[in-house]
Image (tube, rainbow, N blue to C red):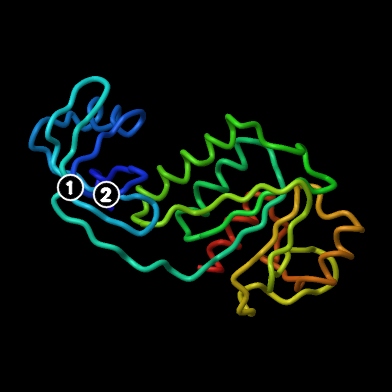
Amino acid sequence: MPHDRFYHPGPLKGSIVLEGDEQHHLFKVMRAHAGTQIELIDGKGMLAQATVVKIDRKTAELSITHSEFCEPTLQRVLGMSLIKQPKLELVIEKCTELGITDFHLFPAAHSERDHLSLNHQNRLHAITISASKQCGRLYLPTIHLHTEIHIPESSAYATLAGNPTQLRDTKTKSILIGPEKGWSQAEEALLIAKAKPVSLHDNILRAETAAIVAAAILS
């Protein structure tokens, strides 16, 4: 992954202006100047080369010199009950790197929180940008927020109940992970009616570890 890749929501053509965190990194960290060459992504499949035309402490004017579009990869879905903020941020970062295309976040009966503040939503979006640039992906994952458990079509769900099939032995590309204290009985009943129970590992995993392991298997 090149160290000179930046994000702009697009369109990536002609002249554009970078502001905010991306401009700050370009100016303060990269020490860019007129003539510096960088790469840009829009999070929707476009990769562009650009030249810095002018830069100061607040804005950077760029000229797009070349751009190309790449088709999206296969959809990989992670449904995740809400967990504590630092752990959820870790899940979003690492699972973005591992190729998750859609995050479905929801409060479960045993979740430690029941919603995300607007600031935390913005923080998670910023994490997907940073992780996408770092790992070289061109599509930002989408974060979907739900007020109750959400079960995407053709999903599996991680559980310790019974003797479920290992996720690695299935062809599913959608997995649900419960909270640290596990699914409630009512949730287990709902899940088993609409999804396939699976095991992730022989050991008992923390929620954030389970999400990262599942994402690695789906990839």
Near-viewer residue (181 or 109): 109
Label 1, residues with CA under 10 Å away: few <14, some 14-19, many ≥20: some
Numbered tag placed on residue 197 in the rendering:
none
Q: Which residue is mark 2?
A: 12
Confirm or deny contact between disc 2 and disc 1 (CB under 8 A): yes
Residue at point 40%, 50% (across, down): 132
Residue at point 15%, 42% (across, down): 63
Side (left or right) of 56 relative to 71: left
Residue at point 31%, 50% (across, down): 41
Above or below — where is 175 with respect to 41? below
Q: Which residue is mark 1?
A: 64
Near-viewer residue (28 or 207): 28
Q: Position of residue 87 (x, y in %)?
A: 62, 41
Q: Position of residue 127 (x, y in %)?
A: 47, 41
Above or below — where is 98 with respect to 123? below
Q: Position of residue 169 (x, y in %)?
A: 63, 79
Amino acid at pointer 2: Leu
Side (left or right) of 164 relative to 166: right
Amino acid at pointer 1: Ile
Tell me where residue 78 sits by quadrant.
Answer: bottom right
Tell me where residue 170 sits by quadrant.
Answer: bottom right
The count of marks equals 2
Residue at point 84%, 66% (across, down): 161
